[in-house]
Image (cartoon, rainbow, N blue to C red):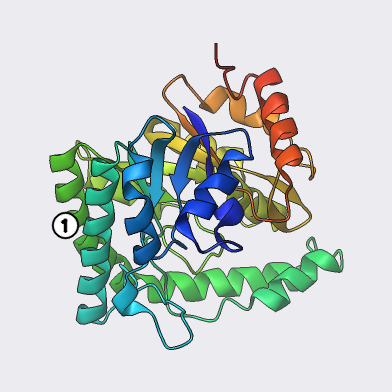
Amino acid sequence: MYGISTCWRSTQITDGNRLLDAMLESGLSTLELDYRIHETEFNKIAKRLKTDEFTILTAHNIFPIPDNALSKNNSFVQPSLSSLDIDERKLAVKYGIKTIHLASDLGAKLVIFHLGKVEMNGERTKLFSFYENNKIDSKEYREFIEGKLDERMAKAPPYFDALLKSLDQLNEEAFHLGILIGAENRYSYEQIPFANEFEHIFQEFAGGNVRYWHDVGHAEISHRLKILNHENDYLKKYKKYLAGMHIHDIKGLQDHLAPGLGDFQFEILKPYLDKDSIRILEIHDQASAQNIQTAVKSLIKMELFKAEK
């Protein structure tokens, strides 16, 4: 139940078959298909993904990038599931349903979703400057972050309501196909879900297919910024809903590093993982194949990954 996201090489390699060849260099053939792969390239590799060469554990919405949605400079802006613009939200749901169907067709267990955002200025540069200048315990920082969180709370309700409408449609489709929806904890506090919004979602869709997807780096950065506590506000609180994790290392406020290249204490994850928990290495392209192979050995030694027989 562990694998690696194609995001390790998808920012460098656009050709589908070359991307799959590169992924095998990691030593892993169990994959998460990430949201940077274009529809044309997916169509080239769809049959290959159904062979014994690969196992697809998860897909990350929106997968693949629709060719007809690309701009002239080949970029794609994902529509938001929490948008107050009805047409944008409907498009986001349409793409999400398509991802769920593709995941089912490929034998995946779960689709990871970014569920939206509250339209506000998170002032990330200013936020990070407090950490970088060792002012995270200052009165000025507490006033800043409390002000931003109050602003978010005041603005959130219509966006959250829009998200619930979107999730209702996605959950119905996922339930029908037997695919889980992984609601991911996000990098920024203006994104959804945040804090107790997770609990509201899980109660709203009790008995359905919505689960908690834990991103280790996102939670740890929130912890280091003293916004939420990694264990108490994420892992302990939502353990009963947990389907799996994006696993990567963190150094300072930089995440998506290969385990062993940062300073995160991975042992804290162990009590929250069981035999059915999905574990995906979500590592960016700075890591080498050797970094990943070393990381896998380390995670097996810590019993976070189970060695293949």
Q: In the rendered structure, which amino acid carries the disc numbered 1?
A: Gln
In the rendering, at what x and y percent does residue 283 appear? 63, 49
Task: Work out whether residue 96 or residue 41 is closer to the camera in this orientation and state it.
Answer: 41
Q: Residue at x 47, y 63 (%)?
A: 36
In the rendering, at what x and y percent does residue 244 appear? 46, 36
Task: Work out whether residue 172 or residue 233 is closer to the camera in this orientation and state it.
Answer: 172
Which quadrant would the C terminus be assigned to in this image?
top right
Residue 142, by quadrant, is bottom right
In the rendering, at what x and y percent does residue 282 appear? 58, 47
- Up the image or down, 124 lies above or below 60; here it is below
Direction from residue 179 to residue 190 in the image, left or right: right
In the rendering, at what x and y percent does residue 268 appear? 66, 30
Q: Residue at x 60, y 69 (%)?
A: 146
Q: Residue at x 40, y 36 (%)?
A: 57
Direction from residue 158 to residue 143 in the image, left or right: right
- Up the image or down, 126 lies above or below 261; here it is below
Is any part of residue 225 visible from this angle?
Answer: yes
Task: Work out whether residue 132 or residue 171 is closer to the camera in this orientation and state it.
Answer: 171
- Residue tagged 1: 169
Q: Residues within 10 Å of mark 1 (few under 14, many from 20)?
A: some
Is any part of residue 63 visible from this angle?
Answer: no
Q: Secondary structure at mark 1?
A: helix
